Image (cartoon, rainbow, N blue to C red):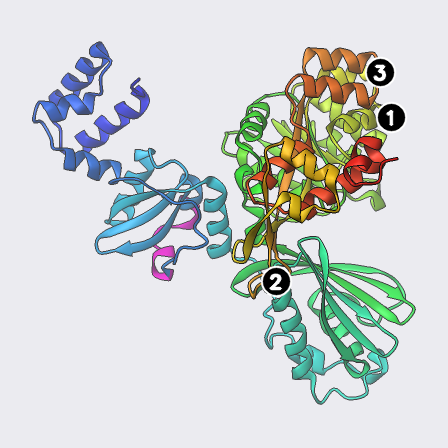
Amino acid sequence: MVDWEREQELVRLLHRQRHLTADQAREVYQEGVKADRSAVEIAVAKGYLTQEQVDEVRGGPVREVASLRDMEVDPGAIGLIPRDMGRRLRAFPVRVRGDTLELAMSDPDNITAIDEVRRHTSLKINPLHVADPEIAWAMDTYWSDDEVVELEGKVAPQVEGISDEVDRIADLSDAPAIVQLASSIITEGVRRSASDVHVESLRDGVAVRFRVDGVMEPGLELPGTVKAALLSRIKIMASLDIAESRQPQDGRFGTRAAGRRVDVRVATRPTLHGENIVLRLLDKTRLYVTFDQLGMSAPVREQVEATLQATRGLVAVAGGTGSGKTTTLYAALHFLRRREVNIETVEDPIEYQLEGVNQSTARPDIDVGFPAHVRAIMRQDPDIIMVGEARDHETMDASFRAALTGHLVITSMHANDAPSAVTRILQMGVEPYLVSSALRAVISQRLLRKVCPECKVTRDVSEALAELPALAKRLQEHRIAVIAEGEGCERCRGTGYLGRTGIFELMRLSPTLKAMVMEDANEEALRHAAISEGMVPMNGDAMAKLRAGIIGVDGLLELYADQVTEYGREFSDLLGRGQ
């Protein structure tokens, strides 16, 4: 079927560039409408223009590109178009080859955008089809004007100026080494893809550890002579009070490390042997992810995207601390901001700044918490509202009332799985009629480590699980004969794991489930009803990823170990702990 809006624009451009006369353009367009056939194809068939001329206007053959992060971006190409034009057109210049500009676009069929860039640059355009989150990543990485703290040297004079009286530093003659040390610690955290760097005060020194893929990894131990200087260096970078060591402090700064743009959130806390500092590394590359990259299966992704197309209702993302809820919320915002809508958020804190989204921070210390922000947002003509976390009755109730009055609301909450999220909402005091009327879906998730692809090997199930025959039997029932595991290599630092993937379950509120909510059904009843209606539980998603060799059996055991206390004997038996 012909997209006549695009067809009309293409014919208009061909006429503007004098490939078609006004009479020819009118003739082929009218014939095309009557025959429901492409007017441009008719023009080529009549000999009014060549296919090469059409391809030039359209921008040449479109090439699919999965990610811009692995491509070599030409610094000289970045400035070929103004930033405001690129952001408006969702187009990013990658490189120039001869007289052709390779242009990453989320909509490569937008010939108006291609023509505007062609006229501005006087270059032919070769469009690259790239997902919008990748476009956003490139823009924020290469077009960012955010002030950053240079890890090397920029604040060295400040460190050298710290007085002995304030920081009890005996010798600052080697201050440049302290600058280098702090820089190296942050760079190492980014290189390891750590989510957090822990700088911990010991009796006689400092220990540095990294949280990688949810697991703490040892780093290095430093002598006590550098402790005060190192802690002060980090506090200066985060604009914290270096004279205050008795109270917790929070700060943040932006920097570049290991070739990446990173926001660093800094939290200090006094302990027995001195201050501990945790640096949360908010890597910009982790922000721009699609649902596929999160690990969602195709059926779950399609259902999530369909759910987010709604104009009203509430979608909750549930999981424990560190389960990736915030990343999923940002992926949803990226998906939604393609539409011409007003998106308002309230977060605590704002982890990533998103172009085209009105973000705000909850400030309960001045009585402007989540509920107050939600009520204020309602007067800002919103289409979509994101509430970073609904952690109490007032916030949850305000979110549901916003959803009920004609807005799409997405939020996160703590719950073990999708059915228990519903019962937790009810336990928080939200009226059943609000839940039944406004709740559209619950996405529940957790993160499991992925087997390193570089050192992955396969083992027979019966051999690998000789000590867990019940689990081996379950895997064989699922037709899983072999499982993957990592032997350990340089890339995964000998752990056998590299990165994490999400496992998900999506419970959409059907009429049956809505009725059960009104009847105050328990979570076990909700779970069975949801599964009977097609919901794949998290352990089913984990089983599929185990079969595909994405995760190892350790990930499945980790999931089952948590479910022992949640669901009872069924999973105890699988772990060999049944009676």
Q: What amino acid type should be assigned to the residue bearing mark 3?
A: Asp
Tell me the quadrant of the picture where the N terminus can be found.
Answer: top left
Majority secondary structure in the magenta region: helix
Residue at (42%, 45%) from the top-left corner?
66
Q: In the image, residue 438 lies at what x, y percent?
A: 71, 19
Residue at (36%, 59%) from the top-left corner?
74
Can you tell which mark lies on residue 520? 3
Magenta segment range?
A: 75-85
Quadrant of res 370: top right
Q: Which numbered disc flags the more N-terminal residue, 2 or 1? A: 2
Q: Nearer the viewer, residue 326 or 76?
A: 326
Q: Is residue 461 above or below residue 250?
A: above
Q: Residues within 10 Å of mark 2 (few under 14, many from 20)?
A: many
Residue identifier under label 1: 427
Residue at (62%, 48%) from the top-left corner?
352
Q: Which numbered disc flags the more N-terminal residue, 3 or 1? A: 1
Residue identifier under label 2: 192
